[in-house]
Image (cartoon, rainbow, N blue to C red):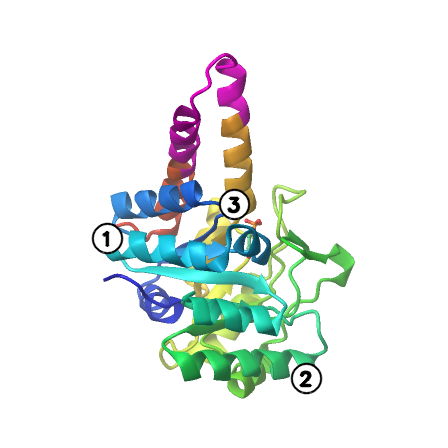
Amino acid sequence: MSIVNAKEIMIEAAENKYAIGAFNVTNIIQMEAVVEAAVEKKSPLIIQTSVKPSKFIGRHVFVAVYRTLAEAAPIPICLHLDHCTDIEYCKQCADAGYTNIMIDASKQVYEENIRQTKAIVDYCHSIGDISVEGELGTVSGVEDQIKVAEDEAALANPTQSVEFVERTGVDVFAPAIGTAHGVYKTKNPKVDFERMGQIHKLLNGNGVKVPLVVHGGTGLPEDYIQKLIEMGGAKFNVSTELKHTLIDATWGYLSEHRDEYDPGKLDAFTKDAIRHAVGHWIDMLGSEGKA
Ligand code: 13P
């Protein structure tokens, strides 16, 4: 049985200076690809779905496939609901069997963010071993149904981060530090490493209690990734890269096999491309062999 929440595997990662890849999937084949990559690398894994695919495929379907794959895999795997702004849907996914829930009330005013995040923490902790991720500040770009313009994005204040974590009781914390969803427009995005380090020190200086999440993994230069792991990043979210991988692989395959009508072959090809991309992330995050 390798069904876990995010907190336990992230604490272990933060203590040992590696990070866990959290890969957004939109269908079952991607889910299988991500699991196969992590099993091959003997790495702990976080699978995540945004709200839209969760509703499209159905939360119970995702959970059933997750449980089947995780129970057969010799590695710990978490299923995370990403950036959910709807309290009721957060609760429904927790009830269905997601093991980490992100309530994203980061666009709300501070007190409302605390109120909503705490409500989900209280709920998830009351029904089982489900960890909760909260966000402070806002990450620019587009993820699922949430859009944040660059000039709207605000970085997390370190002292306020401590208060936020204490008052909400969140298990894992995503401070906005300048990373962005989508494709970075520059080769050297402006990321506030110092802020990340300061927040990590304030929260986890005397032993890791609330591990940190880095959003906007796609396109982050490898030296940034290493530095962010050094500064306490224990979960890296990767979405856009996998979407591009899927679409590009599909397009490439179909262009070369225009007269072939064998969906299984197309599925195998795209699955392989995603497996490869995830394997590369696991190498960068240093989680190979940590399961
Ligand atoms: P990217 O789409 O930039 O990889 O970001 C993913 C993310 O942070 C999902 O929460």
Q: Residue furthest bottom?
A: 167
Q: Position of residue 65 (x, y in %)?
A: 37, 52
Q: For the residue marked with disc 1, what is the amino acid?
A: Ala
The residue closer to the viewer here, 264 or 119, is 264
Q: Position of residue 60 (x, y in %)?
A: 44, 59
The residue closer to the viewer here, 47 or 265, is 265
Q: What is the spatial separation of the Cα atoms under label 2 and label 3, in whole angstroms?
A: 35 Å
Residue at the image position 47 percent from the left and 73 percent from the top: 132
Disc 2 versus disc 3: nearer the observer: 2
- Answer above or below: position of 97 versus 216: below
Label 2 or label 3, whichever comes before in sequence order: 2
The residue closer to the viewer here, 231 or 80, is 80
Q: Position of residue 79 (x, y in %)?
A: 41, 60
Q: For the residue marked with disc 3, what is the amino acid?
A: Pro
Q: Left or right: where does residue 135 sit relative to residue 41? A: right
Instruction: Judge the density around disc 2: few (<14), some (14-19), many (≥20) Cα neighbours within 10 Å.
Output: few
If the image is split into quadrants, where does the N terminus sit? bottom left
**Secondary-structure class at tag 1:** helix
Q: Are marks 2 and 3 in contact (CB under 8 Å)?
A: no
Instruction: Judge the density around disc 1: few (<14), some (14-19), many (≥20) Cα neighbours within 10 Å.
Output: few
Query: Which residue in the protein does label 2 denote?
Result: 111
Q: Is residue 109 in view?
A: yes
- Magenta span: helix, strand or loop, mainly? helix
**Secondary-structure class at tag 3:** loop
Query: Is 263 inside the magenta-drawn segment?
Result: yes
Q: Which mark is residue 72?
A: 1
Query: Which residue in the protein does label 3 denote?
Result: 221
- Which stretch did the figure color magenta? 251-274
